[in-house]
Image (cartoon, rainbow, N blue to C red):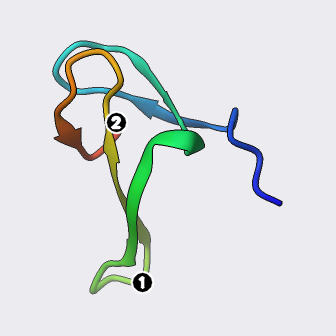
Amino acid sequence: MPDDTQSLGRCPNCDERLTAAWILVEYERDDGTEGIWAECPTCEDVVAPE
């Protein structure tokens, strides 16, 4: 079972800490690295955590 408290980074809009519970999409980029889109619980935007 995934750890929903694992930190993904911060929202680039409001600097809120994002955790795995907010992941919407996980994907593989062309360079082989993992990309993530998550919903920010504070500003409610869909963002790529930084």
Tell me which amino acid carries mark 1: Gly
Query: At 22% from the left edge and 13% from the top edge, which residue is drawn?
Result: 14
Pick the residue in front: 43 or 32: 43
Q: Are marks 1 and 2 in contact (CB under 8 Å)?
A: no
> Mark 2 sits on what residue?
50
Helix, strand or loop at mark 2: loop
Q: Residues within 10 Å of mark 2 (few under 14, many from 20)?
A: few
Query: At 37% from the left edge and 15% from the top edge, which residue is drawn?
Result: 16
Q: Position of residue 15 (x, y in %)?
A: 31, 14
Helix, strand or loop at mark 1: loop
Where, quadrant-wise, is the N terminus in this rendering? bottom right
Residue 31, quarter of picture: bottom left
Q: Position of residue 29 (x, y in %)?
A: 31, 79
- Label annotation for residue 32: 1
N-terminal of the pair, mark 1 or mark 2, is 1
Task: Report whether 7 appears left or right of 32.
Answer: right
Q: Give the Cα separation between the discs numbered 1 and 2.
A: 18 Å
Pick the residue in front: 31 or 15: 15
Q: Residues within 10 Å of mark 1 (few under 14, many from 20)?
A: few
Query: At 38% from the left edge and 76% from the top edge, which residue is drawn?
Result: 27
Tell me which amino acid carries mark 2: Glu
